[in-house]
Amino acid sequence: MGQSASNPILEVNSLYKKFPVYGPFGKLFGAKAHVNAVTDVSFQLYEGETYGLVGESGSGKSTTGRTTLGLTPASAGQVLYQNRDLSAMSGAEMRKFRKDVQLVFQDPFSSLNPRQRIGDALEEPLIIHRMGDKAERQEKVFGILKTVGLQPEHYFRYPHEFSGGQRQRVGLARALIMNPKVIICDEPVSALDVSIQSQILNMLKQLQQELKLTLLFITHDISVVRYISDRIGIMYLGKIVEEALTDALFQEPMHPYTKALFSAVPDFTRSKLKERIVLRGEIPSPLSPPSGCVFHTRCPFATEVCKKETPVLREVREHHKVACHLV
């Protein structure tokens, strides 16, 4: 991984994202409440590494990815790309950012025009950014199809003619066509069979080495993130509660939520079954998150201080951060 570099290629500082909730009359009388999707999230992405962002549904991980990319405006906080604040970028700088940072969607079929051939869909960003003439663009598209394991004849096919795995390869090709430096992968293999998942993940790792890519990998799958990530951030109810190098995190998870998550993953390599930590209750609503530590309502070790004071994500060991009063 690239943490030896002095400056991160992408940095997120105290990111907040709130979505308004309107009443029966819509926006007429303003928002009745706000959903706190992302709350005070900070992390750094170093060149050449894969940072895994893990959490269950509703934890805010996908919103974090989209806000980092600028697809969703942040309510507060700062996103820096190569030390430049996204909100202060000029038009030319933003166009460069759009080329350098690409997104791979969870469902590539919904992001493709069903009436447009795959070759035309891949050529479109090259036309928008005025890259090459018709012949050069076609040559680049054929080359990128080969890179992701597709055949030249796939250029002329429509999205419905592809399998799920092939569509995800098309999604990856569309991200790679602009020669990006950073790719944000939002649950890219969650809808695929396990055998196809491994093919896509192996291809991603290979392309990362060949093209010197930096990845932000968003998923709910613990085994997938363990395989592909150099560092992992664990999200719960819009906050990062633990962050560490992958091996260190799996050897010794410190936050009670991380321990519960890992205990739910079957491990068939051990002679004895590991102890399963069952969390009580349901995830609180992001409309009215609990005071203090957001996890205290389900934590088996919660104390009075957990209910009153919000824990700060702090470094307890080298490269290992935890937001917990008990650690």
Image (cartoon, grey):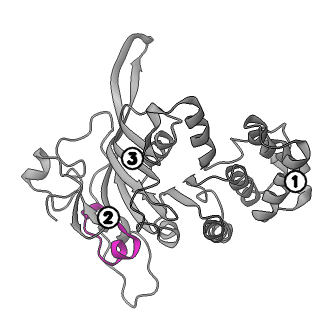
**Start and end of the magenta stretch?**
243-257
Quick check: is 254 in the magenta stretch? yes
Counting from the top left corner in percent of width and height, residue 46 is at: 45, 60
Q: Which residue, given by chain and number where applicable, does mark 3 sit on?
A: 12
Q: Horizontally, is 49 left or right of 169 in the view? A: left
Counting from the top left corner in percent of width and height, residue 155 is at: 88, 51
Q: Quadrant of the C terminus?
A: bottom left
Q: Earlier in the sequence, mark 3 or mark 2?
A: 3
Quick check: is 77 in the magenta stretch? no
Query: Which residue appears at 72% of the width and 37% of the height?
Result: 129
Using the rendered view, name the quadrant where residue 99 is placed.
top right
Query: Which residue appears at 41% of the width and 34% of the height?
Result: 74
Alpha carbon separation for disc pair 3 and 2: 22 Å
Q: Residue furthest left?
A: 304
Q: Which residue, given by chain and number where applicable, does mark 1 sit on?
A: 139
Q: Residue 258 — which label?
A: 2
Q: Amino acid at mark 2?
A: Thr
